[in-house]
Image (cartoon, grey):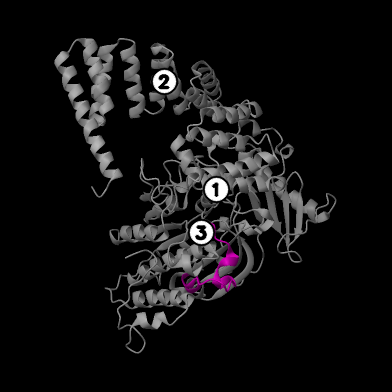
Amino acid sequence: MGEGFLIVPSNAGPTGGSVTELCDSLSPVKRACIVAFVLFTVAGSRSQVNQPKKIQPDMFLVTIDTLRADHVHCYGYSQISTPALDSLANDGIRFDRAFTPSPLTNTSHTTILTGLLPSAHGVTDFAVPLATAHATWAELLRKQGYQTAAFIGAIILDSKTLAPGLDRGFDFYDNFPQHIQSMSRWGRVERRGMEVVRHAEGWLDTHRAGAHFVWVHLYDPHDPYEPPPPYSHIYKDRLYDGEIAYADFALGHFVAYLKQQHWYDEALIIAVGDHGEGLGQHQEETHGIFLYDSTLHVPLIVKLPGQGKAGKNVAAQVRTTDLLPTVLDWLGIAAPAELNGQSLRAYLVVNEVADRTSFGETDYPLRFGWAPLRSVREGGFKFIEAPRPELYDLRADPLEAHNKYAPWDPTVQRLRASMAELRAKFRPYQLSSPAAVGKGTTDELRALGYLGPPDALSSTNVPEPSLLPDPKDKIQEQNLLHAAMLASENNLVNDARSALNKVLEMDPESPTALLQLGQLELDSGNGQKAAYYLRKACEVRPDDAAADFYYAAALNLTGDLASARDALEGSLQLQPSQFPARLLLGQIFLKLGNPKAAEDQFQAALLLEPRNAEAQLELAKALIASREFSDAEMQLRSLSKIQPKNPDVYEWLSKAYSGLGKKQDEERAQQRARELKAKAGKRATRTRNPGK
């Protein structure tokens, strides 16, 4: 059964007729509504053995990525059908003005799971480990006997690579499989919402006893907008809405499952967006750069155990930092003193109306060499600290279109003081130091439309970020850079080139565009063109280790080995822990006839990745070139156990045997290499001609 569809018995119509006949007479939007309604109704009516009532309520956190509040039906958007969110709002409490402090997925989710602002938890960049000093939602609940599990929809939250530490406290964290060969984004960097939900339901089926805390992350509304049928047809002119409608369908399936298991009524369920989406407002197509309400205002719905206060709306301004304190308060657990949020109990069970000050921050502009931004939303005003500061009267100007900033304005002075008071609590400003990530992880980030850690320019870590360009002056460049990354991921090389060349027309020294163009040409095998762009990138940013590495790779492709060696040595001086640079430098030393130097580099690479088969094989080649045949034999025999079907291993093992004078072993290894190559050739032929 395909995703996005529900099969209903043909006699389920209201007059005993065919549901198919009934639906055929309706519009696509009404058909989608009926499917969702039937799913809710049928699941709620299924007979099940009643579960004993639990003292501790089950807790289900559903985060929907890139979800603007003003694109949800129950928030007043009539052009979409979101029956699952609407139903939760009817059974729970809807917060009309909830705000995230960050427009980035990993940072905003870390805030939700810790109750801390980004400056407090420190995860302001990809692959930055969450410090063990900061307790997570799952850790705190597991101490109370909860079974805990997390199901993520994108590799951006994978705890092995881009979100280290986010899995702390979870008995099960549904990371992505490693070493996937598929070029499709599905399963490699992203999961459809229904796949995420099925994983969660499968885990719950096998962990029925006790109290549960389950986090479900639906990534679908994040760009690129590719909803599955029928949402791709119903919302063909508004694909972002189609992704939201599909995510809502997946949520509906999960809620129906909870009802079927009799876990819904007494559960505490929170549905919240992690951040919004620009959709062209303020010229920002996606998110991450600006701190306007388009990317910070998120839907928040809380369903209490027993449906307490069902259908209530809260107009007061609240924050996603308030979610963890709320849960702890509900369970009677003492909250860590460091939390930046406060419990929402007063809004949930009584009628608190006071607004809470909401802070925002983004360091993502630093990836492009632009200034980071900070904001505060308080008393009906929004102040944004930037090279060109901004002040908006939100009551008169809810779209933040008219900047009223003046340095002497008393509102500016008050909000600046509020921001300074907050800043004083945290460490001085600095660019977070991301953990070392491999090229594969960087490619995955680009597939999701993000600039990765190795693309970061070290010279942007300047003492005064306000001296950097204002992102407002660079947003068109960002839109083009983002489009180029997605085009490159979809193998639309000409489209990517066109977008990047437009960036260079705006800024001929854009280091990001130069680096991406160089990488694009490198991947296309155009060594000379790649070297041209990458040399310019190195000139613009002489302290950028990533630019040096890719420049060396281009020079290696052109055959300029000595210059490639020099560029790699410069890159490694800047950042010694680069596995790809160590590997490539060793290979270049081998080509230059210096096997001892090559051996040193391969040994260094294996210190960084001890199990890497390519580095192990290259080390064996260096040992053979140095006539250290016994060591090479040991290395290759060990590798043959790890990669028994790799013909190259046996080919080089035969050379080691030859150097040792082991003629019979040499012939056996050669025969094995020939057999494996023949099998590989047959597999390749079948792949090219599947019908033969």
Crowdedness near tag 3: few (<14), some (14–19) or many (≥20) residues, C-alpha within 10 Å: many
Crowdedness near tag 2: few (<14), some (14–19) or many (≥20) residues, C-alpha within 10 Å: many
Is 440 situated left or right of 645 in this image?
A: right
Is 343 situated left or right of 477 in this image?
A: left
Report the residue marked by disc 1. Answer: 107
- The alpha-carbon separation of the residues under discs 1 and 2 comes to 38 Å
Report the residue marked by disc 3. Answer: 221
Q: How many marks?
A: 3
Crowdedness near tag 1: few (<14), some (14–19) or many (≥20) residues, C-alpha within 10 Å: many
Work out whether residue 273 or residue 652 is closer to the camera in this orientation and state it: 652
Task: Pinpoint residue 438: horizontal percent, then vertical percent.
Answer: 45, 34
Q: Secondary structure at mark 1?
A: helix
Query: Which amino acid, by three-letter code, is at mark 2?
Result: Gln
Q: Nearer the viewer, mark 1 or mark 2?
A: 2
Cβ atoms at labels 1 and 3 below 8 Å apart: no
Q: Most extreme residue toward the bottom, as rendered?
A: 15
The region drawn magenta spans 66-87
- The alpha-carbon separation of the residues under discs 3 and 2 comes to 43 Å
- The alpha-carbon separation of the residues under discs 1 and 3 comes to 17 Å
Work out whether residue 18 or residue 123 is closer to the camera in this orientation and state it: 18
Q: Residue at coordinates 29% horizontally, 73% vertically from top-left?
A: 50
Report the residue marked by disc 2. Answer: 587
Query: Which amino acid, by three-letter code, is at mark 3?
Result: Pro
Q: Is residue 454 above or below residue 599?
A: below
The disc, 1 or 3, on the residue closer to the chain's N-terminal end is: 1
Q: Residue at coordinates 55% horizontally, 72% vertically from top-left?
A: 74
Task: Pinpoint residue 556: horizontal percent, then vertical percent.
Answer: 48, 23
Work out whether residue 97 or residue 569 is closer to the camera in this orientation and state it: 569
